[in-house]
Image: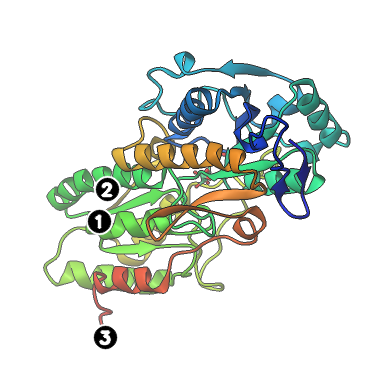
């Protein structure tokens, strides 16, 4: 199948048997990159199921994300090898944050692996970082690339939902349901730190569904003095327990107090986590209220995908392999108005998707009033 990255189209001319080249059996690579997420295996399973059964394709799984293409480490994925993986968390082909542009000869090494395996297309399952690399590889014109939006953070643009998000929210809501009763017994403030590096989708959904007292998200810098006086007022007026949901990337209004500098890992990825404890100690200092912290961390990312995500992953996987055969590449499968569609990868990675104003205004309806109100 020949490919023109400037148009994003593969050559779908008729072969001499009269079949469209889009109907040919293909060799399709697949990788999972970045942080893991519930549902990765469900996407792989869906791709393989349709690829093998309907198109007669071979699907080659590259190990540990782009690293597998750089180091030519792969395994053949067939329907038999995917049995039992629909509910299984993590990714059976592994993941990492290694990517070709970290190495001078990275793109050449990827090209070489593509050639050795005679790959016709590559399906890249990842979040913002992995999909940005997929977009660059698409522009290099090495082979057709199609993206699948993964991340519990739900921050990929052009899709209403990434897979894994709904599962993460359910895990966090289950935790909050438990924290309410212990908070009430001890008349405490419970700070619950959830993931959400740049955006507050998990925090806001979790806070609304879990009946949180307040929610702090990266998109809405908070005033710690205001949070303290709202909680104090609430506890002084006969409500003796509060649950505050904090996204790990939440930021104080500049000048109110400073967060310590964060460590950066070998891929330039800032290591977050810990803001819950900082907020708890700032609140205790200001109010003297008994405060405890729960950091949900990677519990939100591990384990089985919920029913919604299993269906979404199955739809994304089927749409991705169909897209390969339609010859439309350099795109990402997406959920829009409840339907599976495709969007240009360039648009999907152009910026992150934050929470909408409507969602935030809805969340705020359930916050306690300011003492002066
Ligand atoms: O990208 C999803 C995410 O869950 C972020 O919310 C979080 O900051 C990050 O992954 C942590 O990833 P890791 O611990 O794997 O570096």
Q: Residues at badges 1 and 2 in contact (C-beta under 8 Å)?
A: yes
The mark lying in front, picked from 2 and 3, is 2
First in residue order: circle 2 vs circle 3: 2
Q: Is residue 321 left or right of residue 63?
A: left
Q: What residue is drawn where x is 49% and y is 56%?
A: 159
Q: Position of residue 357 (x, y in %)?
A: 41, 73
Q: Say which quarter of the image contains residue 366.
A: bottom left
Number of residues whose C-alpha sits closer than 10 Å to that of mark 2, classed few (under 14), some (14–19) or many (20 or more): many
Quadrant of the drawing holding the N terminus = top right
First in residue order: circle 1 vs circle 3: 1
**Disc 2: which residue:** 173
Q: Is residue 341 left or right of residue 370?
A: right
**Disc 3: which residue:** 372
Q: Position of residue 313 (x, y in %)?
A: 43, 39
Tag on residue 221? none
Whole-number angstrom distance, CA of label 1 to CA of label 2: 7 Å
Number of residues whose C-alpha sits closer than 10 Å to that of mark 3, classed few (under 14), some (14–19) or many (20 or more): few
Q: Say which quarter of the image contains residue 206.
A: bottom left
Tag on residue 209? 1
């Amino acid at each position: 199948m020949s490919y023109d990255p400037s148009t994003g189209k593969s050559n779908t001319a008729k072969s001499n048997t009269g079949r469209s080249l889009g109907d040919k059996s293909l060799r399709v690579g697949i990788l999972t990159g970045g942080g893991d997420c519930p549902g990765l295996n469900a996407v792989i399973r869906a791709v393989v199921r349709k690829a093998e059964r309907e198109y007669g394709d071979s699907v080659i799984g590259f190990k540990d994300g782009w690293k597998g293409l750089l180091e030519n480490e792969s395994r053949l994925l067939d329907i038999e090898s995917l049995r039992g993986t629909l509910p299984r968390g993590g990714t059976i082909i592994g993941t990492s944050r290694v990517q070709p542009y970290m190495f001078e000869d990275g793109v050449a090494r990827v090209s070489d692996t593509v050639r050795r395996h005679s790959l016709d297309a590559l399906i890249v399952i990842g979040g913002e970082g992995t999909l940005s690399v997929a977009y660059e590889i698409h522009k290099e014109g090495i082979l057709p690339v199609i993206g699948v939006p993964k991340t519990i953070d739900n921050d990929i643009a052009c899709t209403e939902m990434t897979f894994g998000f709904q599962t993460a929210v359910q895990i966090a809501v289950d935790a909050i349901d438990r924290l309410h009763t212990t908070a009430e017994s001890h008349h405490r403030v419970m700070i619950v730190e959830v993931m959400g590096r740049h955006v507050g989708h998990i925090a806001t959904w979790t806070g609304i569904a879990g009946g949180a007292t307040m929610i702090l998200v990266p998109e809405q810098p908070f005033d710690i003095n205001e949070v303290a006086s709202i909680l104090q007022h609430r506890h002084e007026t006969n409500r003796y327990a509060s649950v505050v949901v904090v996204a790990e990337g939440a930021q104080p209004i500049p000048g109110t107090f400073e967060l310590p500098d964060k460590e950066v890992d070998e891929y330039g990825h800032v290591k977050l986590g810990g803001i819950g404890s900082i907020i708890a100690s700032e609140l205790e200092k200001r109010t003297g209220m008994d405060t405890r912290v729960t950091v949900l961390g990677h519990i939100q990312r591990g384990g089985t995908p919920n029913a919604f995500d299993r269906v979404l992953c199955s739809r994304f996987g089927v749409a991705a392999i169909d897209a390969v055969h339609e010859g439309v590449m350099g795109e990402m499968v997406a959920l829009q108005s409840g339907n599976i569609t495709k969007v240009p990868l360039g648009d999907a990675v152009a910026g992150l998707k934050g929470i909408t104003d409507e969602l935030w205004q809805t969340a705020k309806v359930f916050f306690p009033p300011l003492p002066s109100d």
